[in-house]
Amino acid sequence: MSELISEDARSWIGRSGEPQRIEINRSDIVKYAIATEQRQEKYLKGDEAPPMFMYGALRPLVPMDELGPDGISVDKFLPELPLKRVMAGGTEMTFHRTVHPGDVIVATRSLSDIIEKQGSTGPLIFVVYDLQVETEAGELVMEERQTRILR
Amino acid sequence: MSDINISALAVGETLPERSHTATNVSLFLYNAIIWNPHRIHYDETYTTQVEKHPGVVIDGPLQGDWLNQVVLNWMGDSGTLTRFNYSNRRASYLGETLTSGGVITAVDPAAKTVDMDIFIKNEKGDVITPGTAQVRFS
């Protein structure tokens, strides 16, 4: 069935990236809360991180020479696929525990599926990632399923 | 912040709407704290001439945050957000005022959960970022 997804690309399904370890600090939460126009004291004072704070905290930190002229760094956790234009698909989050200053968070991203579909304007490839976020002690914080659409 | 009683909630009830008007300053601060150097969020000349957008692009995940705030600000400390999903269906540009809101789609008093559809609309009234959320009341 799969004409666009090579055997090599298929072998990436089930792979996990390097776990990312992040120390949560209050001033980052306060900055995020201001920038996103939060209204609740617990976020504005940095006592608790807003639900999508981890999205920013987990973005890649790469040296300047790994940023392209558009400002973007290449995500190396993507196999070679024949479609190159990447669009954000949906994001689904499940929250188990809130995040607070002093928490040490460990996040692991896995590539869970690569699916070929026929869109109205041509073929599409959906690449599905599962992100698991835990405390360093192993307590589940959140899970997120992210879909990227290549066309 | 209101104290919400789950038994008083009904399907079809709406959540308070809120409007958001991003500025160059607010987008700069947002992209700085999430460490996003993509030029379409702060470099207008590059954005229009190279990536051919009509203007500086309002981040999709920032809209995702505004979207879940509809739920957070409605429930306050009466409950916790357990599930949230969204997708950015259409781009939005600096200068637009976006409106967020939502409607209750299910109430389960036994499980103490409430489900809702939430949205971000542009000035034309198109839903550009739809989502759903579930909260659990304490």
Image: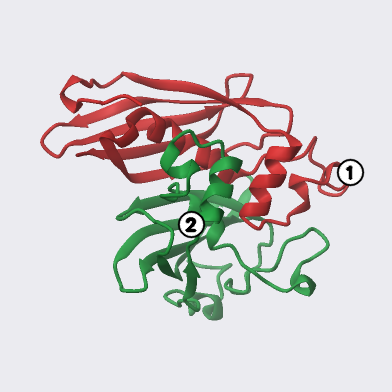
State the mark number for residue B45: 1
Q: In percent of the image, x 63 and y 19: which residue is there? A: B124
State the mark number for residue A29: none
Q: Kindly indicate whether the residues beneath marks 1 and 2 are on one polypeptide chain.
A: no
Chain rendered red: B
Placement of the C terminus of chain B among the 4 image quadrants: top left
Left or right: B90 as drawn, with respect to A52: right
Q: How many labels does the image show?
A: 2
Q: Three-letter amino acid code at disc 2?
A: Met
In the current view of this chain or complex, which residue is farthest to the left? B110
Q: In percent of the image, x 54 and y 48: which residue is there? A: A30
Which chain hosts label 2? A
Left or right: A117 as drawn, with respect to A100: right
Counting other residues with Cα less than 10 Å from the Cα at mark 1, is it few (<14), some (14-19), or many (20 or more)? some
Residue A96 visible within the image: yes
Looking at the image, which is closer to me, A70 or A20? A20
Left or right: B88 as drawn, with respect to B53: left
What residue is disc 2 on?
A54
Marks 1 and 2, how far apart at CA = 31 Å
Q: Three-letter amino acid code at disc 1?
A: Thr
User: Residue B4, located in which quarter of the rendered image?
Assistant: top left
Q: Circle 2 — which element?
A: helix
Q: Circle 1 — which element?
A: helix
Instruction: Name above or below for residue A54 compared with residue B69.
Output: below
Instruction: Name above or below for residue A21 compared with residue B77.
Output: below
Chain rendered green: A
Residue A119 visible within the image: no
Looking at the image, which is closer to me, B46 or B16? B16
Residue A48 picture location, percent across and down: 41, 50
Placement of the N terminus of chain B among the 4 image quadrants: top left
